[in-house]
Amino acid sequence: MLFSTPPLDEHEHAVCARVDELRRALRGQVSEDRRWTGLLRRVSSARAIQGSNSIEGLDVTLDDAVAAIGGGVPLDTPQDVLGAIKG
């Protein structure tokens, strides 16, 4: 190891403890979960699937790719292509 971390003194441990307290207290206000789970995310993922599978010669409609992502049943896609979509 090139460098070693110096040991923390009591004051530094107290500061770290205070930072942890503030993190826990403010988690609800500053750490909002911003997952992108709506239709826009599904459509973007479906387009990525379409592009990836088209490279391999597998054509998938956007509706079928969205259905596969959402756990639905694609209407026009054969089972072997459906496996590639989910993979």
Image: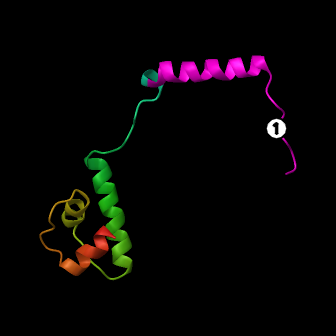
- State the image coordinates of residue 86 (x, y, percent, origin top left): 29, 68
- State the image coordinates of residue 28 (x, y, percent, origin top left): 42, 23
Q: Nearer the viewer, residue 40 or 6?
A: 6
Left or right: 36 with respect to 77? right
Q: Is residue 21 found inside the magenta-colored segment of the image?
A: yes
Magenta segment, prevailing SS (helix, strand or loop): helix
Q: Count the marks.
A: 1
Q: Residue at x 16, y 67 (%)?
A: 74
Left or right: 74 with respect to 23? left
Q: How did the renderer colour the structure?
A: rainbow
Q: Is residue 14 found inside the magenta-colored segment of the image?
A: yes
Q: Secondary structure at mark 1?
A: loop
Left or right: 36 with respect to 64? right
- State the image coordinates of residue 44 (x, y, percent, origin top left): 33, 56
Q: Residue at x 31, y 45 (%)?
A: 37
Q: Residue at x 40, y 35 (%)?
A: 33
Pick the quarter of the image with the C terminus.
bottom left
Above or below for 63 versus 80: above
User: Which residue extends farthest right?
Assistant: 2
Q: Residues within 10 Å of mark 1 (few under 14, many from 20)?
A: few
Q: Nearer the viewer, residue 70 or 15?
A: 15
Q: Residue at x 34, y 58 (%)?
A: 45
- State the image coordinates of residue 15 (x, y, percent, origin top left): 69, 19
Residue on which the image places disc 1: 5
Above or below for 6 versus 57: above
Part of the protein shown in magenta: 1-27
User: Which residue extends farthest bottom?
Assistant: 57
Above or below for 35 versus 77: above
User: Which residue extends farthest left?
Assistant: 75
User: Quadrant location of residue 82?
Assistant: bottom left
Q: Amino acid at mark 1?
A: Thr
Above or below for 36 versus 77: above
